[in-house]
Amino acid sequence: MGKLKPSVTVKGTKDGLLFILDDSCPFSNILNELKQLFEYNRSSLWDGPKTRVLIKLGQRQITKEEEISLRQLFSLKKNLIIQGFESEGKHYLLKPAGIQVLAGTVRSGQVLTHEGDLLLLGDVNPGGCVQATGSIYVLGALRGLAHAGSSGDETALIAASTFKPTQLRIADVISRPPDEWEYTEVGMRFAYLVNNQIAVDQIQHLIQLRPDLEWKEKGKKFF
């Protein structure tokens, strides 16, 4: 019988250690193999000086809970410091299914954080902040700071019924809107990332950017 291919491959680089996880294996198998690797492999790598670790996931995306499981496992080896995770061609975190609806007002000094896409029924006042790993939709006035894609999702959007933010952030890109928005822009608008800059447009143009959001019934378009 041939020897089974390991689901975890470890390589040394000039920056530290590279852990390559087989994206065709169940995540539970990956965790079990890592546990055995740390417990039964007496390599000096696990007890040496502090070493940076990059975890490559292949085509796999993981949930926040799976990320926590990996970090807890690596924390058993005090010298292994996780610097990041990488998935091929996409963000490593899997977006939670659906969109969560919350109601209320984010007042000055308050910060609302959320995992995934968020629909807020209420206002974000000046000095208030709403932050989500996915997109942010405000059915109310956005007059504070909004940070969408906070874990690095560059496809995230920010939309609001009254669009007068003090600052916008999408992934790692920051934009302070021009003063004229405060007076001339009316109606629901949305912000998105293009060429590493934040652009703002009228909500009816959203479908041109995100055709996957278009709702159709029996061939009829609703936008």
Image (cartoon, helix red, strand yellow):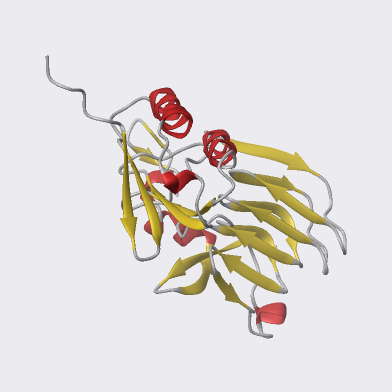
Q: Which residue is drawn at 55% across and 35% down?
A: 73
Towards the viewer: 164 or 220? 164
Expressed as whole percent of the image width and height from the top left, the position of residue 173 reads 54, 71
**Residue farthest along the top direction in this orientation:** 1
For residue 120, side relative to residue 26 (left or right): right
> Residue 76 location in percent, x, y?
59, 38
Seen as rendered, the residue at the extreme right is 108
User: Residue 41's quadrant in the figure?
Assistant: top left
Along the line of sight, which residue is nearer the eye, 112 or 3? 3
- Residue 68 in the image: x percent, y percent? 58, 38
Q: In this view, does 150 lie to the left or right of 22?
A: right
Q: Nearer the viewer, residue 78 or 195?
A: 78
Whether residue 144 sits left or right of residue 174 in the image: it is right
Q: Which residue lies furthest to the bottom in this view?
A: 179
- On screen, residue 30 above or below 125: above
Q: In which quarter of the image is the N terminus?
A: top left
* 91 over 168 or under it: above or below: above
Q: Which residue lies furthest to the left in this view?
A: 1
Image vertical order of residue 114 relative to residue 108, above or below: above
Image: 77 above or below 167: above
User: Which residue appears at 70% of the width and 70% of the height?
Assistant: 165
At 65% from the left and 59% from the top, the residue drawn is 160
Residue 175's quadrant in the figure?
Answer: bottom right
Number of labelled discs? 0
